[in-house]
Image (tube, rainbow, N blue to C red):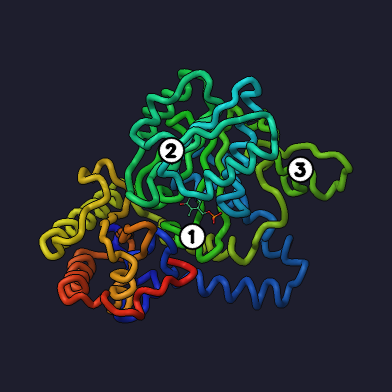
Amino acid sequence: MVLRKDMFDLPEGVIYLDGNSLGALPRAAAARAQTVILDEWGQSLIRAWNSAGWMALPQTVGDRIAGLIGAQPGSVATGDTLSIKVFQALAAALRMRPDRRVILSDSGNFPSDLYMAQGLIATIGKGHELRTPAPEDVAAAIDDSVAAVMLTHVDYRTGRLHDMAAISARARAVGAVMIWDLAHSAGALPLDIAGSGAEFAVGCSYKYLNGGPGAPAFIYARPDIAETVQPALSGWLGHEAPFAMEPDYRPARAAERLRVGTPPIVQLAILDAALDVWDGVDMAELRAASIALSERFIAEVEARCPALVLASPRDPAQRGSQVSFAFEHGYAAIQALIAEGVIGDFRAPDIMRFGFTPLYLDEADVVAAAKVLERVIAERLWDNPKFRTRARVT
Ligand SMILES: *Cc1c(COP(=O)(O)O)cnc(C)c1O
């Protein structure tokens, strides 16, 4: 059984189908935040870096995330935000292939990943090119002009899943560096990053890993190449000996060199506590539960809401842990749904998006959510001016 609702502090009367965007609050995380702020920071002050083990926290948490993504201990560094980790992985990859000029991604990738690539290309100024074919055309576009293949495993908009093993093998065959973004994969499905052979993987911890808003990101570097990586953001905490205060940068060992500055201790402590909910979770069981929930939701919604068109792959083996429907009035419909206690989200231009988190959602929740959605659509509850004004976050 993977359901452990009791470990989460969910608001009464809310069905939360947005854990793919911001995971729910684990009860232990709130308690840990209180301790780290009041006892450790408040009472121990700067002594807590040593006495409360703050300095070890980035690595402890990195090893716990490694366990969830199929990576080796010591191969995952934590900190910063995902956008920064994308930049670091890509910058390192381009230095590893100095005579190639193509970064291959896909047109469905999350904008920030593409923006970071564009910014890096402009900063380097060596005429690199970012190619973004349709997701289904990526594999065929991997040739020996490609320096780095940079893909998000699960498409944030449609939930479409790339074939990690096949694409990684194709990249390796032509000598391209493989970078996987696991933002919508970590904590959502079983992963074998080590087995994929990819050089780098990155991800965030505030989605399925429930680390809270702005929680630290992570970066994996394949152990056999990690010590050759030349970090573009060579900050002091990625230095071999930060407190030697040497004038020249020397990279720390392995993935630790991909750390940059002072770790966000409060967020790391919250994440560390949030990761406790994964103890004893079998990822294959979690995946089976996620598929059962999403299949049930699709069946209910298609039977109840004929105006909504499935925008995710129909085959659950081709999907991550989210389901999207296209609807012309999607934004207003999501706002009306939220007003009725069912939280999903909207992604432009017309996508209503629902995430499935089997740790704190069960079948009764998804059926109840589909019934509310039916009411919102059938009774045109969305057709109300107050649901049409777009907020800053959709
Ligand atoms: C959520 C997400 C991001 C967000 O990056 P931040 O730097 O954490 O804001 C980036 N890329 C992908 C693929 C995402 O899903």
How far separated are the C-alphas under marks 1 and 3?
A: 27 Å
- Callout 1, which amino acid? Tyr
Crowd band around label 2 with a 10 angstrom C-alpha radius: few (<14), some (14–19), many (20+): many
Relative to 175, 160 lies left or right: left
Mark in the foreground, 3 or 2: 2
Foreground mark, 2 or 1, reads 2
Q: Tags 1 and 3 in contact by the CB under 8 Å rule?
A: no
Q: Secondary structure at mark 1?
A: loop
Tell me how far mark 3 sits from mark 2, CA to CA.
34 Å
The image position of residue 253, as x and y in percent, is 69, 37
- Percent of width and height locating residue 367: 18, 67
Residue 239: give its label.
Answer: 3
Q: Between disc 3 and disc 2, whose residue precedes?
A: 2
Q: How many marks on residues? A: 3
Which of the 4 quarters of the picture holds residue 327? bottom left
Name the residue type under label 3.
His
Q: Residues within 10 Å of mark 3 (few under 14, many from 20)?
A: many
Residue on which the image places disc 2: 106
Task: Point out residue 178 in the picture as x, y percentages from the top left corner.
Answer: 50, 31
Q: Judging from the image, what secondary structure is the residue with disc 3 in? A: loop
Q: Is residue 305 above or below residue 159?
A: below
| Callout 3: CB less than 8 Å from ligand 1 | no
Which label number is shown at residue 340? none
| Beta carbon at label 2 within 8 Å of ligand 1 | no
Q: Is mark 1 within 8 Å of ligand 1?
A: yes
Q: CA distance from mark 2 to mark 1?
A: 24 Å
Q: Which mark is residue 206?
A: 1
Kind of residue indicated by mark 2: Asp
Whichever of callouts 2 and 1 sits on the residue coming sooner in the sequence is 2
